[in-house]
Amino acid sequence: MNYKEIVQETLNIEAQTLLKAATLIDDVFERVVDMILKCKGKLIITGVGKSGLIGAKMAATFASTGTPSFFLHPTEALHGDLGMIDENDVVIGISYSGESEELNSILPHIKRFGVPVIGMTKKRDSTLGRASNMIIEVYVEKEACPIDTAPTSSTTLTLALGDALAVCLMRAKDFQKSDFASFHPGGTLGKKLFVKVSNLMQEKNLPIISKDAKIKDAIISISEGCLGTTLVTDEDGKLLALLSDGDIRRALLSKNFSLEDEALKYATLNPMTLDNADILASDALVFIEEKKIQLLVVTDKKKNIQGVLHIHMLIEKGIS
């Protein structure tokens, strides 16, 4: 059995289904988008089985792109959750055949509230079709499965039409990346646009030594600090230099090296610092990578130490 050919055939059937559907789109989408934009409540998606799974994904997409939405299972609706539907809402009902018993059971109650229904089905004269104020037609010539029965092409098309509707709404609302990040603060984009240096920098238990400290003191400070570096300060506590474990290893090559040497002798004077903890962590990462450093000390304008930001902290938190 040639599975590669089966995969190619499946993808081709579903791709052709999408391409044909694109040629059949009429102005119903404009009316549907207009209805949802004017909706003062929520966009509620409902359906059972495979249609329900597609509906749940659609609701998640709408909700994350600026259209308040949630998925309502018809069975749960019949047992109390119908109260979640308000007269200001709009309902999208999904059933390829239009004859899903569970879905059709709640349609009279939805209509009783005066809530408009957008049906996604292949049959306009089906129960769902007749109960809908508008219909987004979902029609496929052939399911991709070998017995032309399992929902494959039809679910793919339904999902794609849901995505297209979400994109229409995003365009209508001028939905931007910053808006998307607001709904995804824990995602990569959210972290990139909202997490600041102040949210990540280490402020306590910093490895700090005075400018008069010896190398042996610096080694202890570096070991206890677990940052691979110790901060050297002047008599006023302001940042003066940085001494890394790499600096010490290089110092060991000196003929006259002694653990009693002053640490400042081998330290990097006037190190690169950041004097604004409110900048984005992603921007700080760019700076760290450009300067090829691992540790960035955050200070105020007068070189008073506020905290440190290590490249490992940024990577650990998923900043990129």
Image (cartoon, rainbow, N blue to C red):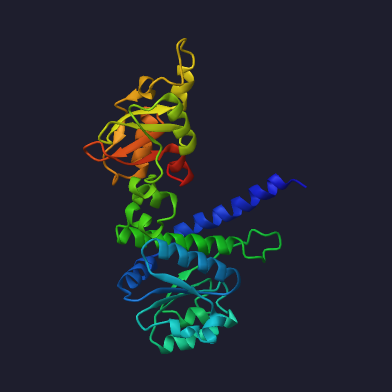
**Which residue is found at the position 58% from the left and 79% from the top?**
100
Outermost front residue: 260
**Which residue is found at the position 33% from the left and 74% from the top?**
39
Of the pair 18 and 47, the residue shown nearer to us: 47
Of the pair 124 and 212, the residue shown nearer to us: 212
Of the pair 219 and 153, the residue shown nearer to us: 219
Of the pair 180 and 98, the residue shown nearer to us: 180
**Which residue is found at the position 54% from the left and 74% from the top?**
47
Outermost left residue: 302
Outermost top residue: 255
In the drawing, does residue 316 fall left or right of residue 169?
right
Q: Is residue 245 above or below residue 24?
A: above
Q: Is residue 240 above or below residue 257?
A: below
Report x, y in % for residue 282.
Answer: 37, 42
**Which residue is found at the position 43% from the left and 29% from the top?**
217
Q: Is residue 280 above or below residue 58?
A: above
In the drawing, does residue 125 fall left or right of residue 113?
right
Q: Quadrant of the C terminus?
A: top left
Report x, y in % for residue 141.
Answer: 59, 62
Report x, y in % for residue 131.
Answer: 46, 83
In the drawing, does residue 284 fall left or right of residue 110?
left
